Structures are given as structure tokens and as C-alpha cells.
Image (cartoon, grey):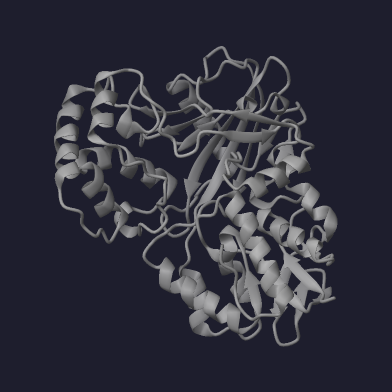
């Protein structure tokens, strides 16, 4: 049996471990942090509030993945239909905004509808950037008021600097009838690209994932500092050397490449061009549960510091003590486009103030718990530097026999099921002894 080494203990690593276990192999997993789960880790406050490292829910249409996750929590999960809304200048409107414009100012709606109708009848073009795609799809007024405004907060990069290969089903393209009904009527049909969501009853989102790692020798607190592909050895910060026959890495590509002995200059430069957002997550426990009618909300206002708000107690009753509610707020930054210049704790006061400004919190609310932390790798930024840089890096990694997987190992926009399957594919490549990288 080959010795397979897996770097990281997140969703993709769980997929790799699961696949290897099915072939009778117990891999060694090295994780830098003191807990498993990676980007999908879960934390419990002393007050009993359960928060994930940013909001996570399962909405996969893959029956196999659904069954695997369900079995890991003994089929004890909550199923719900998500309610999602948006905040813009004092207005709360249903998501997506393009189908729910009822009640917005006439001075906004007239140019918005004029341009959107014209866009519906314009010949299809080939947009070369996200801004051009938005304008050609929705018209300039809607594009600048909603998705471009939100994108500046969420992606941090200007829309003109971004490609369109990440869109998939994420941006709904409504029929004109849907737009007009959403202007004239306060209630509209749901058009979310996924209708059913699942979440564990207890233990947070990581409860779906942690059981996969029982089939591995997991070593926490092991920070990788060196990879020697010729020797097939990984070195960790404590000086230990970990030999391998096959290496599966879910580490971020800009972290992995500089660790590799003799990695070429052009590959290191390409890795340095890869951009991602960092997220300051502020998690708040409140002494009442009636905080929102929505499971999560998108915030378009430039003068509100946060980008998205979610309510974990609405995902599962097990996420908060009885009679309480929880709020999780996300603020996005990036080294390349919007550097973070303060500590995460410095974000708490502005967050609390802005939650009151948009009436999520009341002046008399009792805050039972509040904490802030930084997730250094949040979302991949699909800017124009990315395609060539990813191709250069992953081609090199294939040449030296390192198989990469997951959101940061493939540098893609992976949802949970895609990351898990990516890990399975990477494990198969490593197991077969092929030289190459995984694709999801």
C-alpha cells in the first residue's frame, strides 16, 4: 500500500480521506491549526453559541454526497427553504433584487427599467469582463446600483477587473415578465437556484465532515514549511520529516509554491498574482431570537461596513441557547485590492453600530457574546491575472507530482460538494500514481 500524505484537514481533504479509506488506505493528514474542518470549521462560545467560520449550509443536488453527509450526523439534520433578502438605503427587498424591485423610488425605477428592457432586446454579445456582462444583461443603472455595488464589498476588485468564468447559476437572468411583476407586486415567486438546504441539528457544519477523518492519522498543529518533490518528503515547523509515495495538497497555491524546493521563478511569480479575499467574521449572540425574517441578507450600501449578515440560530435550534438568537457578519478585504488595516477586534464597534442603523439590532438589545476573527482565505478573486497564473502553477505541480484539490488547491469557486469531490479525484490520482492535478 502506498503512503499517501494529505495536507490540510478541510472539506477537500475529507473527500480525499474518504476515497482512500474505500481503498484500504489510512493516510497521514497534516493540519496547521488545532482543529479540523478548514474553511468549514465550527466554534462554540462559552455562552453556548455555535458559529461556523462563515456561513455554511449544504444544498448539493448530488444524492451520493447528501447520503454521505446525512450518515455522518446519523440523519439528524434540519431541512429548510431559505428566506433571503437585500438591504439598500433603508429598503428591505427579497432576493434576487432584479425580480423584487417593488417599493423602490420612481427616480431609480424609470431609468433602471428602460435600460433593462433595452438589454433584453439587444443582440447577445461576448463580454470580456464582469462589468460589461452586468451592463449588457441588466442595463447600467441596475448593474451599478446592485451587483456592482455589492461586488465592490464582496470581491473587493472592481467589476471591470474580473472575468465571468465564475458566474454559473449565481446571477439570475429574469424574463421581462418577472421583472415587471416584481415592480408592480409586493410578493413574487421564489427563483433561487437552490430551494432545499440542510444543516446538522448539533455540532455545526463541521459535524458533516469530521467523521471522514476518523479514517486517517490526523496530526494537528503541524505547519508545513517545506516540500521536496525529488525526495518525496514534507517538512513541518517542528523539524519533523514526513515521507510520502503520493502527496495530496489542499493548501492555498500561493502558500504551497514557495515551500517547494527549487520551484522556478516564473511559477513563484505566477502564484504571487493569485488573489483572494480575507474575511473578518464578527459573531454575535443576542438575548432574543426574532432578529430577522431572512436566513441571510445581502447589504448593498457603501456606507455600511459589512457585506453579508446571516443568522445561525435559524439554521438549527442547536446553534443557540433557548430564547436567544445569533448574528454572523462578514467584512471582506484583500491584499491586492483592499488591504485590511485594522485588527479584527477593531471591527466590532462599527459592526454593532451599523446593525443598529439598519434595524437588525435594537438599542435595548442585550448582547450576550461577541467575537471577531480573521479568515485569511475566504473567496478566490476571479481577476484577469488568474487564468494564466493558475495554468502556470498547476502545470508545474503536475510535473513534480503534487496533486492539488479544493477551493484553494484548484483556486476555483468550489461549493462544499465540489470541494469534497475534488478531494476524491485528487486521491484517485495519487493512488494511481499518475502525475497530474485533480479536476472537479
In the image shown, does 241 or 176 lie closer to the viewer? 176
Residue at 62% x, 33% y is 283
How far from the left and from the top, in percent, is residue 57?
A: 60, 39
**Residue 163 in view in this figure:** yes
Q: Is residue 8 above or below residue 77?
A: below
Indicate whether 383 appears above or below 366: below
- Residue farthest to the top, as pictured: 364
Q: Left or right: 298 with respect to 173?
A: right
User: Where, by quadrant of the figure, is residue 6 drawn?
Assistant: bottom right
> What residue lies at 83% left-to-right and 60% top-to-bottom?
216
In this rendering, would 410 be left or right of 423? Answer: left
- Compared to residue 316, the image places residue 403 above or below, namely below
Q: Position of residue 413 (x, y in %)?
A: 50, 55
In the image: residue 69, left or right of residue 292: right
Q: From the viewer's perspective, is 142 left or right of 36?
A: left
The image shows residue 353, relative to residue 41, as above or below, that is above
Which corner quadrant holds the N terminus?
Answer: bottom right
Residue 388 figure quarter: bottom left
| Quarter of the C terminus within the rendering | bottom right
Q: Position of residue 176 (x, y in %)?
A: 23, 34
- Residue drawn at x 76%, y 27% is 48
State whether residue 31 appears in this view: no
* Rendered location of residue 314, percent (x, y): 61, 25
Amino acid at each position: 500500500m502506498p503512503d499517501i500524505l494529505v495536507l490540510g484537514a478541510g472539506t477537500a481533504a475529507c473527500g480525499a480521506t474518504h476515497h482512500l479509506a474505500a481503498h484500504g488506505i489510512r493516510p497521514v493528514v497534516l493540519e496547521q491549526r488545532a482543529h479540523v474542518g478548514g474553511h468549514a470549521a465550527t466554534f462554540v462560545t462559552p455562552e453556548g453559541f455555535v458559529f461556523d467560520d462563515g456561513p455554511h449550509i449544504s444544498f448539493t443536488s448530488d444524492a451520493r454526497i447528501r447520503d454521505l453527509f446525512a450518515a455522518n450526523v446519523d440523519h439528524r439534520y434540519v431541512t429548510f427553504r431559505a428566506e433571503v433578502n437585500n438591504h439598500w438605503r433603508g429598503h428591505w427587498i427579497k432576493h434576487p433584487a432584479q425580480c423584487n424591485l417593488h417599493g423602490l423610488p420612481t427616480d431609480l425605477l424609470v431609468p433602471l427599467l428602460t435600460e433593462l428592457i433595452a438589454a433584453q432586446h439587444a443582440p447577445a454579445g461576448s463580454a470580456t469582463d464582469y462589468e460589461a456582462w452586468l451592463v449588457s444583461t441588466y442595463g447600467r443603472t441596475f448593474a451599478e446600483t446592485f451587483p456592482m455595488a455589492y461586488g465592490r464589498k464582496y470581491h473587493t476588485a472592481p467589476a471591470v477587473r474580473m472575468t465571468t468564468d465564475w458566474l454559473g447559476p449565481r446571477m439570475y437572468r429574469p424574463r421581462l415578465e418577472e421583472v415587471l411583476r416584481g415592480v408592480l407586486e409586493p410578493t413574487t415567486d421564489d427563483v433561487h437556484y437552490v430551494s432545499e438546504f440542510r444543516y446538522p441539528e448539533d455540532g455545526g457544519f463541521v459535524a458533516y465532515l469530521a467523521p471522514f477523518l476518523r479514517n486517517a492519522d490526523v496530526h494537528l498543529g503541524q505547519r508545513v514549511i517545506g516540500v521536496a518533490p525529488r525526495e518525496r518528503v514534507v517538512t513541518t515547523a517542528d523539524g519533523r520529516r514526513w515521507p510520502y509515495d503520493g502527496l495530496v495538497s489542499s493548501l492555498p497555491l500561493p502558500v504551497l509554491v514557495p515551500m517547494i524546493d527549487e520551484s522556478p521563478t516564473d511559477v513563484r511569480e505566477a502564484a504571487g498574482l493569485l488573489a483572494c479575499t480575507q474575511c473578518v467574521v464578527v459573531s454575535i449572540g443576542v438575548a432574543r431570537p426574532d432578529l430577522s425574517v431572512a436566513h441571510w441578507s445581502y447589504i448593498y450600501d457603501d456606507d455600511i461596513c459589512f457585506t453579508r449578515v446571516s443568522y445561525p440560530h435559524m439554521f438549527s435550534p442547536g446553534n443557540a441557547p433557548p430564547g436567544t438568537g445569533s448574528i454572523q457578519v462578514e467584512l471582506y478585504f484583500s491584499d491586492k485590492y483592499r488591504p485590511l488595516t485594522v485588527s479584527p477586534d477593531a471591527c466590532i464597534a462599527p459592526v454593532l453600530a451599523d446593525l443598529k442603523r439598519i434595524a437588525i439590532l435594537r438599542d435595548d438589545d442585550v448582547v450576550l457574546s461577541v467575537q471577531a476573527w480573521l479568515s485569511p482565505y475566504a473567496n478566490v478573486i476571479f481577476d484577469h491575472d488568474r487564468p494564466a497564473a493558475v495554468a502556470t502553477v498547476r502545470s508545474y505541480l503536475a510535473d513534480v507530482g503534487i496533486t492539488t484539490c479544493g477551493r484553494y488547491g484548484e483556486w476555483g469557486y468550489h461549493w462544499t460538494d465540489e470541494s469534497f469531490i475534488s478531494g476524491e479525484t485528487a486521491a484517485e490520482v495519487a493512488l494511481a500514481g499518475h502525475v497530474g492535478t485533480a479536476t472537479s
